[in-house]
Amino acid sequence: MTPEAKVKKKVAARLKTLGAYYFYPVTGGYGKSGVPDIIGCYEGKFFGIECKAGRNKPTPLQEKNLSDIKANDGISLVINEDNIDDVLVYIGGKHHDPRQLELDFGDSPALKLNDARLWASRRSLIQLERTRNRGKQK
């Protein structure tokens, strides 16, 4: 399997997680050149994903097609091994952002601001639920 094929496979796995409709267009001499590697739709939003391995960049024609998709209010992404989770972020939205729940247990004891807000909201919901349960027990 080529390095680019590995990227495509990982992107497809993320799209399956979302339940997105997608396909790999095959031009075969009859289609349009420069079409992104993966075309699809998720929650009414059209997307085109160009998969690259390593430091490879899209060709000018691929860039033009991605720009055309974006100009028509679609989502256009260039994905490689380093940004595969961007598929979940930009296509799936903030609710599917895998980075949203990361906690920093490294040298710094501080949580990231978004994580701190998430935990504060969760704590508030737990406290509210406990208060409601206490009222039911009386």
Image (tube, grey):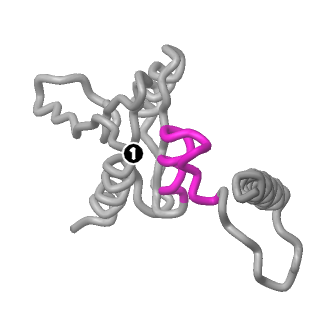
**Residue 5 relative to residue 74: left or right:** left
**Residue 75 relative to residue 10: left or right:** right
From the viewer's perspective, is residue 30 above or below residue 95?
above
Q: Where is residue 64 in the image (x, y as percent from the top left)?
A: 46, 25
**Residue 54 relative to residue 111: left or right:** left
Q: Where is residue 112 in the image (x, y as percent from the top left)?
A: 82, 63
Amino acid on which disc 1 is placed: Leu
Q: What stretch is highlighted in magenta?
A: 83-99
From the viewer's perspective, is residue 74 above or below residue 93?
above
Q: Going 48% across and 56% down the picture, which residue do you hit?
A: 84
Q: Going 31% across and 49% down the picture, which residue do you hit?
A: 16
Q: Is the magenta stretch mostly helix, strand or loop?
A: helix
Q: Is residue 5 magenta-colored?
A: no
Q: Can residue 114 be seen in this view?
A: no
Q: Is residue 80 visible?
A: yes
From the viewer's side, name the closer residue of 61 and 95: 95
**Residue 83 relative to residue 18: left or right:** right
From the viewer's perspective, is residue 109 above or below residue 85?
below
From the viewer's side, name the closer residue of 38 and 88: 88
Q: Is residue 92 magenta-colored?
A: yes
Picture quarter with the C terminus: bottom right
Q: Going 80% across and 58% down the picture, which residue do you hit?
A: 127
Residue 47 position by quadrant: top left
Q: Going 39% across and 45% down the picture, which residue do you hit?
A: 18
Picture quarter with the N terminus: bottom left
Q: Position of residue 110 (x, y in %)?
A: 88, 73
Q: Residue furthest top?
A: 72
Q: How many marks on residues?
A: 1
From the viewer's side, name the closer residue of 46 and 130: 130
Identify the residue under disc 1: 18
Q: Position of residue 123 (x, y in %)?
A: 79, 60
